[in-house]
Image (spheres, rainbow, N blue to C red):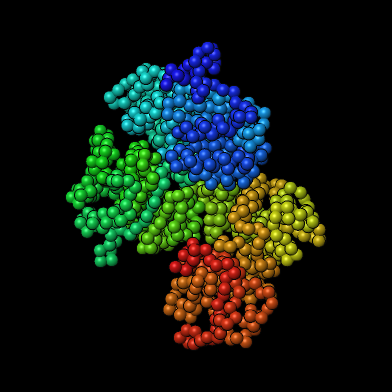
Amino acid sequence: MSNVMRDAILNGFYDEKILGNNFFSPKLLANEQDEKIWLTLREELYHCQSFTWAVAFITQDMLVPLKVVLADLAAKGVGGTIITSNYLNFNNPRVFEELAKIPNLKVKIADEAGFHVKGYLFEHEDYQTLVIGSANFTRSAMLSNYEWALKASSRNQADLTKQLAQKISRLEDTALRNLQGLVDNGEKRGLVVSATGTGKTYLGAFAVKDFKPKRFLYVVHREQIAKKSLASFYHVIGGKKQDYGLLNGNKHDKNKKYLFATIQTLSQPDMLKSFDPNEFDYNLIDEAHRAAAPSYQKILQYFKPQFLLGMTATPERTDEQNVYQIFDYNLAYDIRLRDALEDKMLTPFHYVGVQDYELNGQSIDETTDLRYLVSEDRVNYVLKEIDYYGYCGDQAKGLVFCSRKEEARELADLFSEKDHPAVALTNEDSESTRNKIVQKLVAGEIEYIVAVDLFNEGIDIPALNQIIMLRNTESSIVFIQQLGRGLRKYPGKEFVTVLDFIGNYKNNYMIPIALNHDTSRDKDQAKREARLPHFIDVSTINFSKVASEKILASLDQIKLDNMRELRQSYQSLKNKLGRIPLLHDFAQYGSVSPMVFANNRGLDNYAAFLIKMGEAVKLNNYENAVLSFLTKELLNGKRAHELILLQMLLKQKQVSQEDFVSELRKKEIYVNKAVLNSIDDILSLDFFDVKQGKTTKKAQYGDQPVVVHSSLFDYELNQELLNALTQNKWFKDLFKDAIETGLLLSTNYDQQKQFTLYQQYDRKDACRLLNWPRDVSAPMYGYRVGDHDTPIFITYRKDDQEKRNALYHNTLENGRSLRWYTRVPRHLDSEEVQRLLKTPDMHIHVFVKRSDADGKQFFYLGEAQIQSDSVKEELLGPKKKPAVGMNLLLKRPLKTSMSELLFE
């Protein structure tokens, strides 16, 4: 075939006398009577093994014929990628909806400014075809417009198709562009954070290829990784094989152009001095989270490359060493496990948290004796669960993590005795031994490797189809490292089963947090993650009921927002940013939820936290009071109105009510006379003029209006506040930060309504959002019958069962009907009962939490109507006190997930 293609190419580009070929010869395509550009693309699609199109504009009127072809290709297992753009907002959103229906098509949006390309690349078995020209994928361009496009075919190694493939690759690879941008801007260092299995080695190879170094140095801690990386770099960069060499205990290829070294060998004093500090112009540190170690610091201080690249899956460290600082805070790329799974870069997993073996009611914990861990009954239980949940493929290829070396060896022996061949590996085993055992697993000679202190990083076994965790979760970092061992893609591997045996471990609370990459330190969020199944794209996270209860018990014993934890999160983000982080940074980077700072009883505001962190923040008493008001009352974003007005007043001295209302309407935020009056009550602090202990909340917040609304038309900040914003930069920055963060958080709520379905609110939130003039949450207890609104707060499971559950037995039926009782004593003719039953257009708002342990926040389940024939007076409790019971019919039936979260 090579001669046929060669002659066809020569016929088109060199001499027409050489015999051509209709399929391979270069062609100038146009839309003519019998020939259409689309017909050529269609023919190529039917013959290709995959395709990648980079095309600026797509119209819906060409998608039907494309779908026909791709449906046929899907049956053959052939698919491809279309890279398009939002350039000039040409592509209608409906186009993307239709493209998403095609299962064998991946759609990517290029973020290149002015993206206007039209290139179509088709991969065949040993050659490629490209079509490039003026034609977008629109009906007019494909069928009728006066368009020109050149079609050319070439072998895979030909330069032209390589150029196009590289151009397309660049459109897809944000990380490469960012790295090149660092180099172009004269930066000397950069860091890539990329989850295990996402191809960071190849990314590094492409970056080095682009740089074209005279000499290149790669450093890592394991010989096996160095060897594999050498092969990957050679595959990408090419050239002479003799230009690539190793520097380790056995080989000293010191003079090679591309040198792959182990840190143990390179950091030896004599070895290091044998190199000139300027020897290499591009250095790469793999597993860069180790770069703070003394051996790596020797390397970093000795060599003076033009550019230093660090790559790691886990930049966070527990020893407070700042990896980001080492690489000059130049984070070129950051893709974590969740991102990689959602982008389908890794194999999906099914995680199942199950109860570990119990004997006489006693479960495994940190102190359990070895004899119990390796008892025959426990091993039988473990193998039974492993068999029940299964694996993808014909044979198990599993990695078992346990806590102790003796445990690993005995478990491996017991697994083998029970016809599940297994071998134990620990850090005492040599690298050659480990490699041999891994090969046996891949070949199917054994089913399991039982590991201790191994396989957390650096070594991957793509063939793995099971991860078994028989140990306490030491840290979120280690948990994700171990989970990631099995997620590399592998032929025939459609998913990985992850089975976690959960005992009575104090660190159980880390499991849902790590799995969901939840760094919020929000206990309510962690509890939801432990109670409900979760999904990351098509990966699933499930806990058995008993395992879930063990995690919840662990959560009840831990304070996620204690100062030590907050300090650690603060330092980590400060390391990443290279500056003091603000609340907005925590929200933007998915770190600690800003509300954790707001809800912390030991902190008045974020300034108080910064002072505890040793930062030189200074506020006077009034500034501190105002910042506390913003933090405690407005930061949550549950109503954006006040925040928007304050933001407007930061830009101009006075704001008319007309302009304020206009701004709200422009942002599609509800506004009426009642809410405008409520805003006055909030910003004048009159809403908080309620006695609380020896003083009032109003006094705690400065005791004077934050905003003066002197007439119907003008809002303005009070003079003391204006002076503070002018004179104290710290105060101004933190004031602005609280507003901006609150507005960011407000996007979690439907600002066209008072309450957002299934969001959480407390009693004070209800008073404010119902536009009541005072905070009457303290005496509200379970409900308050207002003039037009009645908020009802229900704790479904009372902690004091005997005292309270017997009195108020709330039940939910059909996901919609909730039995509810008034307080006692109440009768049918009681004044508040009559107002509740007889007031026209009474809005009943239902808020529910699962138990008292869930804090002050209740989930909003929407409005409800009273089922009239269900209302009756009943005698409740042992003292037979009268109350009125009734069925509340939710206007919207509960979502399954909410029903499970609150009522099961």
- Number of callouts in the render? 0
Whole-percent x, y for residue 729 in the image: 66, 45
Residue depicted at x 64% and y 28%: 32
Q: Quadrant of the C terminus?
A: bottom left
- Residue 579 falls in which quadrant of the image? top right
Q: Nearer the viewer, residue 109 or 771?
A: 109
Query: Can the viewer see residue 705?
Result: no
Q: Position of residue 820 (x, y in %)?
A: 54, 77
Residue furthest to the left in view is 417
Give me the residue at 38% from left, 33% from top: 294
Image position of 194 (left or right of 244): right
Occupied quadrant, residue 361 = bottom left
Image x and y of residue 134, in percent? 63, 28
Write the residue at 23% across / 41% down: 445
Q: Quadrant of the N terminus?
A: top left
Residue 457's place in the image compared with 557, above or below, is: above
Q: Nearer the viewer, residue 120 or 819?
A: 120
Q: Is residue 753 visible?
A: yes
